[in-house]
Amino acid sequence: MKVSTGWVSILVALLFSTQLMADPREIIREQLLKADARIPVKSVQSTDMPSVYEVALESGEVLYAHESGEFFIVGHLFRVDDQEGIVNVTEQTQNSMRLEALAGIDPNHLVTYPAKGEHKTTIYVYTDVDCPYCRQLHDEVEALNEMGVEVSYLAFPRGGPNTATYRTMVTIWCGETAEERVELMDKVKSGAKVSDKSCDNPVFDQLVMGQQMGVSGTPAMVLEDGSMVPGFMPAARIAQMLDLN
């Protein structure tokens, strides 16, 4: 059977236009789901690198994919900038994801120590009430408040649910008012015991959210730009880091 060159040209054009219409973001999603339907894809976005897409997962992880959906890279992507030097592009994405998560938290689900005088900034601290370094950091909260820093605690009982620490943190978050939650936090951080309470509380959800944000130990501070700073720091060093002096 002889096919005219005209029909061949039309078929080639149709095939080419179909390929152009295929959205690499959908191709990448489909490939990931084909590999494992449990992969929680949050978003797929283009990057400044040709043919490379950023894939953000609901679990907080970020990876990179070729537009074909055949090749994936796990790790941090860096960009060289004339003014900023080496920029961690992956960290910027994770910062945005942390801010998005924090924006969805009910303020009543935080144990907050307000700034005194002019409010300059807020730091969010993932804490475990039985962690020695968390207790050291708590001793610095008053000084931070005096510097204009609001400190808001989120729960991160490192041992997970069904532990004494978890139950103690539930008790704190079950305080009926902001003042009571602060009072309970102060007592526990000083080493005092409190009677267990039970209520509908955000402790487990905050633990999971912390894991998604990349918290692996406590204390872990999240700053207003979404960046995370692990470990203990004295108030003076935190102020220097925040450029408050």
Image (cartoon, rainbow, N blue to C red):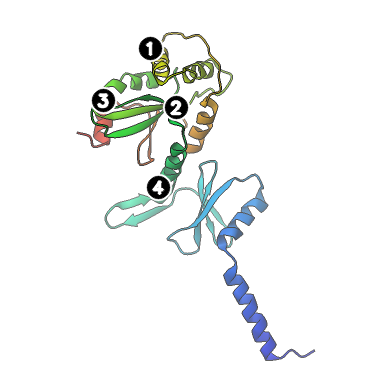
- Of the numbered discs in the image, which one, if any, rests on residue 108? 2
Would you place residue 51 above or below residue 35 in this image?
below
Which element carries disc 4, helix, strand or loop? helix
Amino acid type at circle 3 is Lys
* In front of the other: 76 or 176: 176
Would you place residue 78 above or below residue 117 in this image?
below
- Tag 1 residue: 190
Earlier residue among tags 1 and 3 = 3
> Residue 169: x and y, percent?
49, 19
> Residue 118: x and y, percent?
23, 31
The Cα atoms of the two marked residues, 4 and 2, are separated by: 28 Å
Q: Nearer the viewer, mark 4 or mark 3?
A: 3
> Residue 6: x and y, percent?
67, 90
Which element carries disc 1, helix, strand or loop? loop
Marks 1/2 in contact by CB < 8 Å: the verdict is no
- Tag 4 residue: 92
Would you place residue 87 above or below residue 183 in this image?
below
Q: Which residue is drawn at 28% across and 25% down?
A: 145
Q: Is residue 242 left or right of residue 129?
A: left
Amino acid type at circle 2 is Asn
Marks 4/1 in contact by CB < 8 Å: the verdict is no
Earlier residue among tags 4 and 2 = 4
Q: In this view, does 2 lie to the left or right of 117?
A: right
The Cα atoms of the two marked residues, 1 and 3, are separated by: 22 Å
Q: Which of marks 1 and 3 is in front?
A: 3
- State which quarter of the image contains the C terminus: top left
Residue 70 visible in image: no
The Cα atoms of the two marked residues, 1 and 2, are separated by: 23 Å
- Tag 3 residue: 116
Earlier residue among tags 4 and 1 = 4
